[in-house]
């Protein structure tokens, strides 16, 4: 976990000049941006998420949606004086759900990428989350080179999947590259031999490694993508985005973000509002 903190610090410095958040995504706020008023008037923020994505958002044994991002969204909405509703969506159609106003934002370990920034408005990054390869600890796979001729899986619609899918050289070195419904299924398939490795989020991998010590390992010689997480909104919804961003910074300042992070990860992995 300490290594992840170092990565987080390095990434926030690297991305600080590239990702300035919603407050500066449009230097002149549009006079017809009623995004914040729209949410305040209905008294509810509808958060779109993948409810099979522990520890960011998932269902517990009582079928309640819980997780790190769930706690962040609950506290944010509490401070905004509105309710929060968690709406599970297909990760492959999340942008469509947003554009049709079935949800108000995407908040679930959502990686900020140049492609997504073209069609969405993002807050500043609040957590670093490099994409990595996970294998079974006793698999004998130690390096990326060992994946040659192997079956590799990733969640369909994830940044890990999209990055590998575009990397023809890497993808062609695998015996097969497959998309699966979610990370839980991906790890289950890995365990029964349906794949040899899973490309996924570091925070998710660390969560499962902590739950079942000695079962999984991370290929340490490579990073698929140096990714950071943000909350995604409809393009141009700058007023709502800025309100959420400012609230997260307020939570960082008073120690609430650190408290929530320590609950889920054992240490503070958040980066928003910290000195760069």
Image: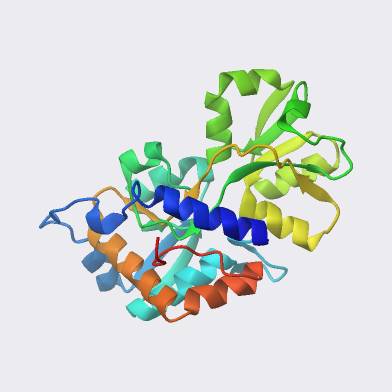
Can you give x and y, in whole percent of width and height, for residue 206 in the image? 70, 56
**Depth order, front residue of 257/96:** 257
| Res 203 quadrant in image | bottom right
Vertical placement of residue 204 versus 66, above or below? above
Q: Could you tell me which residue is drawn at 78 percent across and 28 percent down?
A: 146
Vertical placement of residue 118 versus 273, above or below? above
Vertical placement of residue 107 versus 198, above or below? below
Can you give x and y, in whole percent of width and height, for residue 197 in the image? 75, 36
Q: Could you tell me which residue is drawn at 53 percent across and 33 percent down?
A: 162
Q: Could you tell me which residue is drawn at 62 percent across and 56 percent down?
A: 4
Looking at the figure, which quarter contains the C terminus?
bottom left
Looking at the figure, which quarter contains the N terminus?
bottom right
Q: How is the image coloured?
A: rainbow
**Depth order, front residue of 28/17:** 17
Number of numbered discs on residues:
0
Can you give x and y, in whole percent of width and height, for residue 101 in the image? 33, 53
Can you give x and y, in whole percent of width and height, for residue 221 in the image? 69, 38
Vertical placement of residue 100 versus 107, above or below? above
Q: Is residue 51 visible?
A: no
Q: Could you tell me which residue is drawn at 70 percent across and 59 percent down?
A: 207
Q: Furthest-right residue in view?
A: 138
**Depth order, front residue of 205/190:** 205
Q: Is residue 71 visible?
A: yes
Tell whether 167 sits left or right of 148. Answer: left
């Amino acid at each position: 976990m300490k290594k992840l903190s170092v990565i987080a610090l390095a990434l926030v410095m690297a991305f600080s000049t590239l990702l300035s958040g919603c407050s500066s995504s449009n230097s002149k706020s549009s006079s017809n941006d009623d995004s914040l008023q729209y949410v305040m008037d209905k008294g509810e923020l509808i958060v779109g998420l993948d409810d099979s994505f522990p520890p960011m958002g998932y269902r517990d044994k009582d079928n309640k949606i819980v997780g790190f991002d769930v706690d962040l969204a609950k506290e944010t909405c509490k401070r905004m004086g509105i309710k929060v509703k968690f709406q599970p969506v297909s990760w492959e159609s999340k942008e469509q759900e947003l554009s049709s106003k079935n949800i108000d934002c995407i908040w679930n370990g959502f990686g900020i990428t140049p492609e997504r920034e073209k069609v969405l408005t993002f807050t500043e990054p609040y957590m670093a989350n490099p994409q990595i390869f996970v294998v079974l600890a006793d698999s004998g796979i130690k390096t990326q080179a060992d994946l040659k001729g192997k079956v590799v899986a990733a969640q369909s619609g994830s940044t890990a999947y999209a990055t590998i899918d575009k990397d023809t050289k890497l993808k062609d070195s695998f015996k097969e590259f497959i998309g699966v419904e979610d990370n839980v299924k991906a790890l289950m398939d890995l365990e029964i031999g349906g794949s040899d490795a899973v490309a996924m989020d570091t925070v998710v991998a660390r969560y499962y490694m902590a739950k079942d010590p000695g079962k999984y390992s991370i290929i340490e010689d490579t990073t698929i993508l140096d990714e950071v997480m943000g909350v995604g909104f409809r393009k141009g919804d700058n007023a709502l985005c800025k309100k959420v961003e400012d609230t997260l910074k307020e939570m960082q300042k008073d120690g609430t973000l650190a408290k929530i992070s320590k609950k889920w990860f054992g240490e503070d992995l958040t980066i928003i509002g910290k000195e760069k």
